[in-house]
Amino acid sequence: MSALVTSTWRGGAAEAVRSCPACGAVERSPHAGAVFDHLRPADDDLWTFWKCDACASLYPDPRPSMDSIGAAYSDYYTHHPQHAGGLPGSNGTVSVLSRCVDGYLNARFGSTLPNAMPIGHLVFSMIEPLRLKLDYHGRHLFLAQRTPGRVLDVGSGNGDFLLRARAMGWDARGIDPDPAAVGASRAQGLVVCVGFADCRSPELGGAFDVVTMRHSIEHVAHPGDDLRHCLGHLRPGGMLWLAWPNPQGVGARIFRSAWRGLEAPRHLCIPSAEAMRGLLLGLGFEAPRLIRRGHHARSIARESARIAEHRPGWLNRVRRHLGGVVAWAADMAATLSSGAGEELVMVAFAPERRCERD
């Protein structure tokens, strides 16, 4: 595979990446070429992704410059308001299913969601893939030392999780670099600030019991810097919760350049579990560990198969029919193993006693 080298893209300038953003190693191997933005498959911009030989993280080289990357988010999904609800995709109606979901959340997270059916905890506890799915959508807040407490969502998008956390009794606040996404969140009465992980707006208040980053860390050029700022937001003993695409999962291996997790040109580094653990320990976090994801892969596998339809070659003609098989395999793997699904989920904790960091 030959690298496509360009100094510009439709959004502006591009820049070279000399070393792995996750671990700093320079040795690498080509992973996927001619990767297009799945939101604009007809665009001429094509990107090359590399695999770090040291830590197995994936990253594009070249990538959009930091001055131009905002153009890739002009019509991103985070611009659209969401609605609070127990089950993702809820339309706000109080159905038996949503009441059972809320019953599970009340028992698992110590929340007081109204109209909940307590039997929901028993039902979902017996279906492991769905139990793990609900734990994920509550971002495992029950693992924090204080529940409910104060939670900060870095990369909060349209406020979907903030609404859910607030309904569960948490003081939930957010940060997002996209003014349109922040506007959509504020329109729903949420406290969200424009900025990055280093934001110190007075609206955020003091230290947090939990900081979450769901599919945010892969959008930054220097993940170590953002994780260090997250540590600065946490009180001693506070929990960091992370979720990001798995560069070593079933989908990444099978779909390759058609894998939805590449998300060119918005994903600037997709760390491996090994690389993330190393970053966290190096910054002073304690006890980083992966958590099983459960049922989750249907959407990303289906979209990867759809991307394959726009790509040439006989292998992509095969891949376009593999969405269902990959989703089933990834869900089973993610139910049994914390490192085998389409997503990686990791928690780590700030030390109980530490010096204040900038």
Image (cartoon, rainbow, N blue to C red):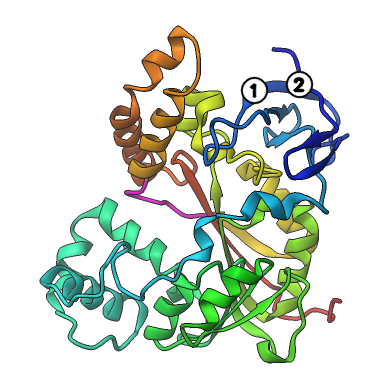
Q: CA distance from mark 1 to mark 2?
A: 7 Å
Relative to 10, residue 42 above or below: above
Q: Magenta region, mostly helix, strand or loop?
A: loop
Please say if the residues under marks 1 and 2 sit with CB atoms less than 8 Å apart: yes
Name which residue type carries label 1: Ala
Left or right: 298, with 70 as reference point: left
Left or right: 10, with 86 as reference point: right
Please state the extent of the stretch shown in magenta in the rendering.
Answer: 290-296
Which circle's residue, 1 or 2, is located before the other in the chain? 2
The residue labelled by disc 2 is 4
Relative to 41, residue 355 above or below: below
Image coordinates for residue 261, horizontal then vertical, percent: 53, 40
Question: Which label was assigned to residue 34?
Answer: 1
**Image quadrant in which the N terminus is located:** top right
| Residue 26 visible in rendering | yes
Q: Is residue 194 located in the magenta-colored stretch of the structure?
A: no
